[in-house]
Amino acid sequence: MQKQKLNRPELICVAAIPMSLHYLLKGQAVENGKNGFVVPPKNNNELANAMLNIMQVNDNKINEMRAYSLAKIKNNYEIGIIIQKWLTLYQG
């Protein structure tokens, strides 16, 4: 089976809890601690800590993070919203 890279909105749509590098976060879907974890770039210790922390998050918090993610995707990435953004961009 071929591996497929998913971007952050796709990860959130499938209810995954993503980790993101801080410099990739600006304007994106991941909010540290709310629906994923953000780590500074080139910091192996912080990445390792984030990975350990996510394994210790209880099921209630995971479900809360998933629900927040799905609501955020619906409110920001629904097809009608995306079309409107493209129209606004195209029309200037």
Image (spheres, grey):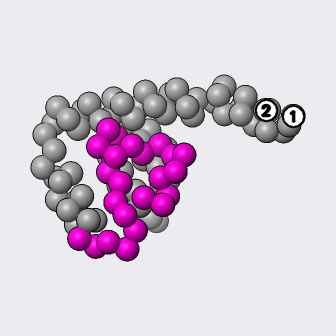
Relative to 69, 91 lies left or right = right
Q: Main secondary structure of the magenta part?
A: loop
Q: Quadrant of residue 79?
A: top right
| Residue 3 position within the rendered picture, expressed as x and y whole percent measured from the top left | 44, 64
Q: Secondary structure at mark 2?
A: helix
| Residue 7 position within the rendered picture, expressed as x and y whole percent measured from the top left | 50, 53
Query: Which residue corresponds to mark 2?
Result: 88
- Residue at 75% x, 37% y is 86
Instruction: Name the residue type under label 1.
Output: Gln
| Residue 48 position within the rendered picture, expressed as x and y whole percent measured from the top left | 22, 66
Closer to us: 85 or 45: 45
Magenta region, residue range: 22-45
- Residue at 42% x, 45% y is 30
Asked if marks 1 and 2 touch (Cβ < 8 Å), the reply is yes
Query: Which residue corresponds to mark 1?
Result: 91
Q: Quarter of the image containing the N terminus?
A: bottom left
Magenta stretch: residue 46 in it? Answer: no
In this view, 67 is above or below 89 = above
Q: Secondary structure at mark 1?
A: helix
- Residue at 20% x, 62% y is 49
Q: Give me the C-alpha separation between circle 1 and circle 2.
A: 5 Å
Magenta stretch: residue 28 in it? Answer: yes
Circle count = 2
Callout 2 crowding tier (Cα within 10 Å): few <14, some 14–19, many ≥20: few
